[in-house]
Image: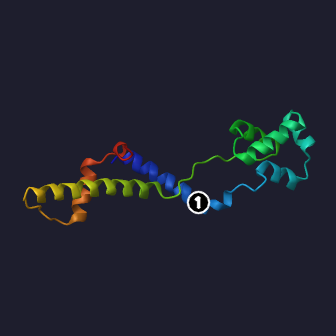
Amino acid sequence: MDKNRKVARSRLDERFSNMKPIEQYSAPSKGWTRAIRDALGMTIDQLAKRLGVHKTSVYRFEKSEGHGTIQLKTLRKIAESLDCTLVYALVPNDSLSERVETRARAIANETHSSVRHTMSLEDQEFIDRNQEEQINEYIRENIRDRDLWE
């Protein structure tokens, strides 16, 4: 498999490990904008003035944030007006390296069992080296990152 991608996966996994548990980043039920605005004691009129919009726009922004339909550029502008930083990330549920390894093993196991089955049907003896060694060799020699997600 591609060594550059392996290094990139490892670096991303390291960065993501610092973000766990992911639940700590769950938005409050009323959304971040409303939660922070309320915590600051800022009214909708005051936030609207800072944003340069009408207060009905702020109502719409808070509602769309709660529904998950707010645009990132709008949320970024709101964050700036609240002296906050918008943090946007896709955080994998599992390690990227483990996910790639698991997928490669699944493909190798499928191929390995298919070859064993075909050879047994043809009454050919299958040289039974250590199965794990065969799978690792197959992964090294035959599986490329781009082949994993077909």
Q: Position of residue 118 (x, y in %)?
A: 15, 55
76 or 111: nearer the eye? 111
Residue position for label 1: 18
68 or 46: nearer the eye? 68
- Identify which residue is drawn at 69% across, 39% down: 72
- Identify which residue is drawn at 79% across, 44% down: 63
Left or right: 70 as drawn, with respect to 9: right
- Identify which residue is drawn at 89% across, 34% down: 54
Q: Quadrant of residue 59?
A: top right
Q: Quadrant of residue 80?
A: top right
Q: Quadrant of residue 75?
A: top right
Left or right: 15 as drawn, with respect to 60: left
The crowd level at tag 1 (other Cα within 10 Å; few <14, some 14-19, many 20+) is: few
- Identify which residue is drawn at 67% across, 57% down: 25
Q: Position of residue 81 (x, y in %)?
A: 82, 41
Q: Position of residue 22 (x, y in %)?
A: 62, 59
Q: How many labels sit on residues?
A: 1
Q: Amino acid at mark 1?
A: Asn
Q: Is residue 116 above or below residue 43?
A: below
Q: SS class of the residue under badge 1?
A: loop
Q: Is residue 38 visible?
A: yes
Left or right: 134 as drawn, with respect to 125: right
Quick one: quadrant of the C terminus?
top left
Image colouring: rainbow
Left or right: 6 as drawn, with respect to 48: left
Q: Is residue 85 visible?
A: no
Q: Position of residue 34 (x, y in %)?
A: 82, 50
Q: Is residue 121 above or below residue 145?
A: below
